[in-house]
Amino acid sequence: MPLLANSPTSPTPSYSSKIDEDGQWDGGSFVPRDFSEAKWKLEGQPWTSTYHTLTKLREFGLDPESERAKKTVELVRHNCRWDHDGQPYWDGEVEECINGQTVATGAYFGVDISSIVERLLGDRMEDGGWNCERERGSVRSSFDSTISVLEGLLEYERVTGGTQESIAARKSGEEYLLKRKLFRRLSNGAVVDEKYLLFDEPGRWNYDILRALDYFRKQSLLTGEAPDSRLQEAIDHVRFKRQDDGKWLFDREHKGREWFTMNEGVGRPSSWMTLRALRVLKWWGEKHV
């Protein structure tokens, strides 16, 4: 049943032409150097800083053994400091979403980020997940924070083998999502947020069920575990959203400064959405995708 009635189009990323001499992008770790709170309110969150760019380079598959990647990692190590309190970049900061993706990127590029992993293990909430609002009093996990941390722990595990503690934390975060079938409230089964049923790329810190399914696909391929049956309703929604021409649409965008766009516009067919959806359905066992 439907839950909502509702080709990569960008040029090859030219991040090398955007990088600063000190190895940063746009002069900052999470926020560009020249960005102000007033600009944020006017333009939206910027996506051109070092953190966001390194995340995309990882997702695009930049060879971590390449000379350029290794040089950038070292430049970031020596020159980049977090906006929060001036912490060295590869030491992480305090927010779970940021630390989760920093773990993923650091592990991918061969950085020892075990100290950030340890912090994330201590930040896990009683219900099994994470919430970047924890320091501001939140006592419940969020879908957005949990998926960001899970992606980091899984990449850490892929590269290093993980630890007994990190694997247990990963499994508890997965269970948090699975108990809720990726998008439903545990209390009454209602949809937590209808935006979770809309697909976008790049998702950045935002959660949606296609991102979660892609995570579980990667987890299954790494661990050899069979797909969990509690993913079925989310899979059905992915199948429902396929258009008559076999493609999937780009559902929503996140405004703000960026190096380039990856889709042709909201409501239009998207090669990125189609690739990701087909990949998930093939993993699930669809024979004709």
Image (spheres, helix red, strand yellow):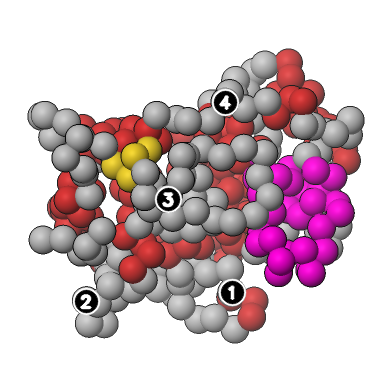
Mark toward the viewer: 1 or 4: 4
In this rendering, position of residue 251 left or right of residue 42? left
Q: Secondary structure at mark 3?
A: loop
Quadrant housing residue 177: bottom left
Magenta stretch: helix, strand or loop mostly? loop
Question: How far apart in space, not on screen, are marks 3 and 4 (Cα)?
Answer: 18 Å
Give the quarter of the figure containing the C terminus: top left
Residue on which the image places disc 3: 266
Residue 117 against residue 261 in the figure, above or below:
below
In the rendered image, residue 121, in percent from the top left (x then y), is placed at 55, 60
Residue pictured at 80% horizontal, 43% vertical: 26
In the rendered image, residue 160, in percent from the top left (x then y), is placed at 53, 34
Mark toward the viewer: 1 or 3: 3
In the rendered image, residue 43, in percent from the top left (x then y), is placed at 69, 61
Q: Which numbered marker is on residue 133?
A: 1
* Residue nearest the observer in this picture, 198 or 243: 243
Q: Which numbered marker is on residue 189?
A: 2
| Boundaries of the magenta span | 26-53
Question: How far apart in space, not on screen, are marks 1 and 4 (Cα)?
Answer: 36 Å
In the rendered image, residue 287, in percent from the top left (x then y), is placed at 10, 29
Question: How far apart in space, not on screen, are marks 2 and 3 (Cα)?
Answer: 29 Å
**Upstream in sequence: badge 2 or badge 3:** 2
Q: Amino acid at mark 4?
A: Pro
284 part of magenta stretch = no
Question: How far apart in space, not on screen, are marks 1 and 3 (Cα)?
Answer: 29 Å
Residue on which the image places disc 4: 11
Residue pictured at 42% horizontal, 65% vertical: 143
**Upstream in sequence: badge 1 or badge 2:** 1
**Upstream in sequence: badge 1 or badge 4:** 4
Give the quarter of the figure containing the N terminus: bottom left
- Mark 2 near mark 3, Cβ–Cβ under 8 Å? no
